[in-house]
Amino acid sequence: MAVISLIEIIHIIIATLVLGYIFTGLFPLRGSRKDILDSYTKGFDWSEFWFACMVAAPGVILHEMGHKFVAMFFGLTAFFQVSYFGLLLGIILKLLGTGFIILAPGYVVISGATPLQMMLSAFAGPFINLVLWITAMLVLKNMKSLSRRQAIFWSLTKHVNMWLFIFNMLPIPPLDGFKVWIPLFQMIF
């Protein structure tokens, strides 16, 4: 059995491309406000699109792969599924210009997990975001000779992963925090 199936690779590509589209134009790659306004009249900016893919997708895709690989470590079946509804909602919000982003591009289906296995698998995703957040903070603190583009990349990586970690650890269903905190409290009390 393959670690990642062909259909999962296709789902990862779809999620990455849609995330890139949703985040295109939100990152300040240009120098002035006039440059930013001009970018909206000149059409689609492929450079910004690929930059947005590089900033947004790793936090989301690696988050989901964290769930998958921890579940697989326990010998469970785990499959990454793209959420077409979540992606469509993100696209609609982008097209409407709401400025509000919902990141629900996919989820991992895990079969046969015990409560402890599910809790640890659920925490693995936010833990990846925590590691990426801390890594970005350390790079920004210790690397003094970053180019403007590199500094923007690491700053945005820090912020995206900070919010993904915080949001996903809320104890609200169906977020990961619900699958982590509720069983943890039940085991303690």
Image (cartoon, rainbow, N blue to C red):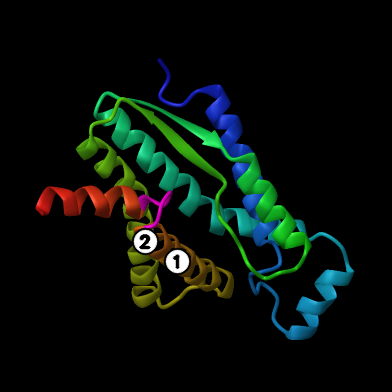
Marks 2 and 1, the one that precedes in the sequence: 1
Determine whether the residue tagged by mark 1 lies in a helix, strand or loop: helix
Determine whether the residue tagged by mark 2 lies in a helix, strand or loop: loop
Question: Residue drawn at (28%, 38%), measured in percent from left and top?
Answer: 118
Q: Is the residue 36 above or below the residue 49 in the image?
A: below
Question: Residue drawn at (30%, 40%), measured in percent from left and top?
Answer: 121
Residue 110 among magenta residues: no
Real-space Cα distance between discs 2 and 1? Answer: 11 Å
Find residue 161 and report its horizontal and vertical position in percent.
44, 62
**What residue occupies the far bottom of the structure in this picture?**
33
Count of labels shown? 2
Q: Is the residue 85 above or below the residue 164 in the image?
A: above
Instruction: Using the rendered view, name the quadrant where residue 138 is placed.
Output: bottom left
Q: Which residues are magenta?
A: 172-176
Q: Quadrant of the C terminus?
A: bottom left
Question: Residue drawn at (35%, 59%), measured in percent from left and top?
Answer: 169
Amino acid on which disc 2 is placed: Leu
Q: Which residue is mark 1?
A: 163
Find residue 178 and report its horizontal and vertical position in percent.
33, 52
Contact, mark 2 vs mark 1 (Cβ under 8 Å): no
Residue 174 among magenta residues: yes
- Which one is in front in this view, the residue at disc 2 or the one at disc 1? 2
- Mark 2 Cα shell of 10 Å, populated few (<14), some (14-19), many (≥20): some
Tell me the chief SS of the magenta region.
Answer: loop
Find residue 53 and report its horizontal and vertical position in percent.
61, 53
Amino acid on which disc 1 is placed: Trp
Find residue 11 and report its horizontal and vertical position in percent.
59, 34
Which of the pair 56/109 is nearer the observer?
Answer: 109
Q: Which residue is mark 2?
A: 170
**What residue occupies the far left of the structure in this picture?**
188
